[in-house]
Structures are given as structure tokens and as C-alpha cells.
Image: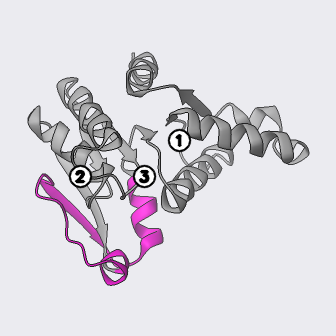
């Protein structure tokens, strides 16, 4: 299956978040999945590296706007680059290209990717697929959103989001979905 992994660009090699993303890449790769990431640094690099260590196919979805904003190039573990001019094209490509998506901790970019995919799922704009948010941070973020915006987010819209405490629980949710 094609699995997109969203995540932050801040983690560096040796940091806990980077090492967790590296292990997630290894888990996905050892299960025979093709991995799609944003293709750059941080958790994108770590997941790409981990999947590559398991000889998985790694797709980096990159864009000109990111590289004009931040001086980065695709990481060395990307085997196939899918390049777009605009950031929103990149986000849609990451979503359209996957059978399921996992979201590691991240910032505004990761939240945007989650929100766009969630909205496309709940409006029926894309075929149903699993969207798993990993870590206590996402659970707390969405618990607050659901609490404070309760009347605007009915329960039938919430079921598209799946929460996992860590990468192993996320991998289990993914296995259940793909079985």
C-alpha cells in the first residue's frame, strides 16, 4: 500500500522525535509499504531513511514554494521525487497518492495536511481511507477543538480521525484497516 506520513520539519538526528519517525519508516518499510513524505528534513527525512533501510520505495512530494521559503532540497533517501510548483498541489498529491495517512507530531504545516485530508474525507471528495494521528499532542489538540467547537463538529464528522498513542499503536491501526 501507499502510506503518506505527515510530520514536522524540526526534529534532528539523535532527537527522540526523529528516532521515532525513523522507526515508523522501518515498520512501514518492513511491511512492504511504499512511503510518501514531504521529502525534506525532520520527520520526513527520518521516515524516508527508515523505510529506505528496509528497501521500501520512498516517494518525496516536493514543491518550489517550500524551497523558496526554506533553503532545502529533497533528502537523500527519496527514490522518486514528485515535484509541484505550489504548496497546495503538494498537499493534495500527498493525500491523493495514499491508501492511508499517518500524522506524526508537527506544527502548522502538519495541522494543515490533517485538516485538508479530514475535510476531503468528510465531504466525500476522496475515497475513504484511514487517517491516524500519532501522539498525545494531537489527541489534546482535537479534544480541545471538539470541546470548544462542539456544535460545529458533529460526531459523524469525527469518526474520520483515528488516534494512536505511539507509532506501534498507529501501525496496528493501519494493519487492521488494510486487512
Q: Residue furthest right?
A: 151
**For mark 2, does the 10 Å Cα neighbourhood hold few (<14), some (14 to 19), or many (20 or more) residues?**
many
* Relative vertical location of residue 54 with respect to residue 64 in this rendering, above or below: above
Q: Does residue 164 appear left or right of residue 85 in this picture?
A: right
**Label 3 crowd bin: few (<14), some (14–19), many (20+), radius 10 Å:** some
Earlier in the chain: of badge 2 and badge 3, it is 2
- Residue 154, quarter of the rendered image: top right
**Image x and y of residue 52, in percent:** 12, 41
Q: Earlier in the sequence, mark 1 or mark 2?
A: 2
Magenta-span inclusion, residue 123: no
Does the magenta portion include 88?
A: yes
Magenta span covers which residues? 65-94
Q: Give the residue at mark 1.
A: 127
Tell me what residue is drawn at x 76 percent, y 42 percent.
144
Spatial CA span between label 3 and label 1: 9 Å
Q: Secondary structure at mark 1?
A: loop
Q: CA distance from mark 1 to mark 2?
A: 28 Å
**SS at mark 2 in the image:** helix
On residue 96, the disc is: 3
State the residue at coordinates (76%, 45%). 145
Place of residue 156 in the rendered image (x, y in percent of width and height, measured from the top left): 77, 33
State the count of labels. Answer: 3
Q: Is residue 44 left or right of residue 110?
A: left
Residue that mark 2 sits on: 45
> In terms of depth relative to the viewer, which is nearer, 123 or 147?
147
Q: Which of the two discs, 3 and 1, labels the residue nearer the N terminus?
A: 3
Amino acid at each position: 500500500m501507499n502510506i503518506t506520513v505527515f510530520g514536522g520539519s524540526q526534529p534532528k538526528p539523535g532527537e527522540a522525535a526523529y528516532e521515532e519517525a525513523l522507526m515508523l519508516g522501518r515498520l512501514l518499510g518492513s511491511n512492504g509499504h511504499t512511503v510518501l513524505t514531504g521529502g525534506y528534513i525532520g520527520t520526513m527525512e527520518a521516515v524516508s531513511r527508515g523505510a529506505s533501510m528496509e528497501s521500501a520505495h520512498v516517494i518525496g512530494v516536493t514543491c518550489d514554494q517550500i524551497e523558496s521559503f526554506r533553503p532545502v532540497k529533497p533528502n537523500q533517501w527519496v527514490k522518486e521525487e514528485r515535484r509541484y510548483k505550489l504548496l497546495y498541489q503538494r498537499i493534495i498529491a500527498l493525500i491523493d497518492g495514499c491508501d492511508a495517512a499517518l500524522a506524526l507530531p508537527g506544527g502548522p504545516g502538519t495541522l494543515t495536511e490533517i485538516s485538508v485530508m479530514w475535510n476531503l474525507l468528510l465531504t466525500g471528495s476522496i475515497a475513504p481511507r484511514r487517517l491516524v494521528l500519532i501522539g498525545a499532542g494531537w489527541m489534546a489538540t482535537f479534544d480541545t477543538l471538539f470541546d470548544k467547537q462542539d456544535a460545529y463538529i458533529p460526531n459523524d464528522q469525527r469518526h474520520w480521525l483515528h488516534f494512536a498513542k505511539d507509532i506501534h499503536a498507529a501501525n496496528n491501526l493501519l494493519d487492521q484497516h488494510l486487512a
